[in-house]
């Protein structure tokens, strides 16, 4: 979507330009500016290092390695091209690389990159993270910044986010010319900011439903009150046991309880003196395996 200049005579679309045409370089210019103003990516991030590589002999380096307030690493990849190249695949490699980083190593990396003492780096990072932390969070997030993204990238990112629980954001940065000045328009396109909380909720719901389907179990929780007695956040089995026990204590006839609770699924046992209910069940069940025990 183009930008417009406003005047009394109307709206005039600004001419779009390219980073190449304006001789704006990827690392020396865009990366440097984002490193100084990393907050324009729309959240609290602490820049740890640029051109980071965990391996000394590796030719592949993370453009910007950052840390969020929850203690999670963020891999930021930049491209000035109009299609983003293969940056999503490149970023996934980097995620695998940095996923083994420890908190102590991150502190040393910050100290080296910012030329401060390790003790000062530790203080900065621990103050940055909300709450106490013993180690970095497990999940590594990805932020992709490019002049534009091909359909291959956007479809891959959406597929990974929806099906594999990845957290990848895409920011499009577009250059415009106005009276000889270059204006940069930075917009988050995946996920849309207003839809992110909804997508997180849907992802959690989907994960919960998947667990339920795969296990075949009912994870519904119940709050039950019988007279003055209460039980909260109970499983179905615990809730039924509680209700039956309290009804029996209150003098409800056993036959009525069996009738109201699918009595054919219950096995009545008669413990001997000093014998537990469980032992009586084993003795009397004679190899049967009812779902519930009385």
Image (cartoon, helix red, strand yellow):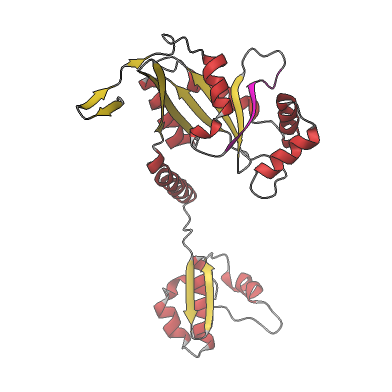
Quarter containing the N terminus: top left
User: How would you classify the magenta stretch by its main secondary structure?
Assistant: strand
- The quadrant in which residue 273 appears is bottom right
Rendered residue at 60%/72% (across/down): 281
Quarter containing the C terminus: bottom right
Rendered residue at 46%/16% (across/down): 80
Q: Residue furthest bottom?
A: 251
Residue 208 in view, yes or no: yes
Image vertical order of residue 196 relative to residue 262, above or below:
above
Residue 90 in view, yes or no: no
Q: Position of residue 155 (x, y in %)?
A: 38, 26
Closer to the camera in the image, 190 or 22: 22
User: What span is in magenta?
Assistant: 45-55
Image vertical order of residue 176 relative to residue 110, above or below:
above
Q: Position of residue 170 (x, y in %)?
A: 44, 29
**Image mark count:** 0
Rendered residue at 44%/75% (across/down): 263
Closer to the camera in the image, 195 or 16: 16
Q: Position of residue 70 (x, y in %)?
A: 61, 44
Image vertical order of residue 137 relative to residue 93, above or below:
below
Image vertical order of residue 17 relative to residue 104, above or below:
above
- The quadrant in which residue 106 appears is top right
60 displayed left or right of 194: right
Determine if the magenta segment contains residue 202: no
Q: Position of residue 135 (x, y in %)?
A: 70, 41
Closer to the camera in the image, 79 or 256: 79
Q: Residue furthest front?
A: 8
Rendered residue at 53%/30% (across/down): 142
94 displayed left or right of 86: right
């Amino acid at each position: 979507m183009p930008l417009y200049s406003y005047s009394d005579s109307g709206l005039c679309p600004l001419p779009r330009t390219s980073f190449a045409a304006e001789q704006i370089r990827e690392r020396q210019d865009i990366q440097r500016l984002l490193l100084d103003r990393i907050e324009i990516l729309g959240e609290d991030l602490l820049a740890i290092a640029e051109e980071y590589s965990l391996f000394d002999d590796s030719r592949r380096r993370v453009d910007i390695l950052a840390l969020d307030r929850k203690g999670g690493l963020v891999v930021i990849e930049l491209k000035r091209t109009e299609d983003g190249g293969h940056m999503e695949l490149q970023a996934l490699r980097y995620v695998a690389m940095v996923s083994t980083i420890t908190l102590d190593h991150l502190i040393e990396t910050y100290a080296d990159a910012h030329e401060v003492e390790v003790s000062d780096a530790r203080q900065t990072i621990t103050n940055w993270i909300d709450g106490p932390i013993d180690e970095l969070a497990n999940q590594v997030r990805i932020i992709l910044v490019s002049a534009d993204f091909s359909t291959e990238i956007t479809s891959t990112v959406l597929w990974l986010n929806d099906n594999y629980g990845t957290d990848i954001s895409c920011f499009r940065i577009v250059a415009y010319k106005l009276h000889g000045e270059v204006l940069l328009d930075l917009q988050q396109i995946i996920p849309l900011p207003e839809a992110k909380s909804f997508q997180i909720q849907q992802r959690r719901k989907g994960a919960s439903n998947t667990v339920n389907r795969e296990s075949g179990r009912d994870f519904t929780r119940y709050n039950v009150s019988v007279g003055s007695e209460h039980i909260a956040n109970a499983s179905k089995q615990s809730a039924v046991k509680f209700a039956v026990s309290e009804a029996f204590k209150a003098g409800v006839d056993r036959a009525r309880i069996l009738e109201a609770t699918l009595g054919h699924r219950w096995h009545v046992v008669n413990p001997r003196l000093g014998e537990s209910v469980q032992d009586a069940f084993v003795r009397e069940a004679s190899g049967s395996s009812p779902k519930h025990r009385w």
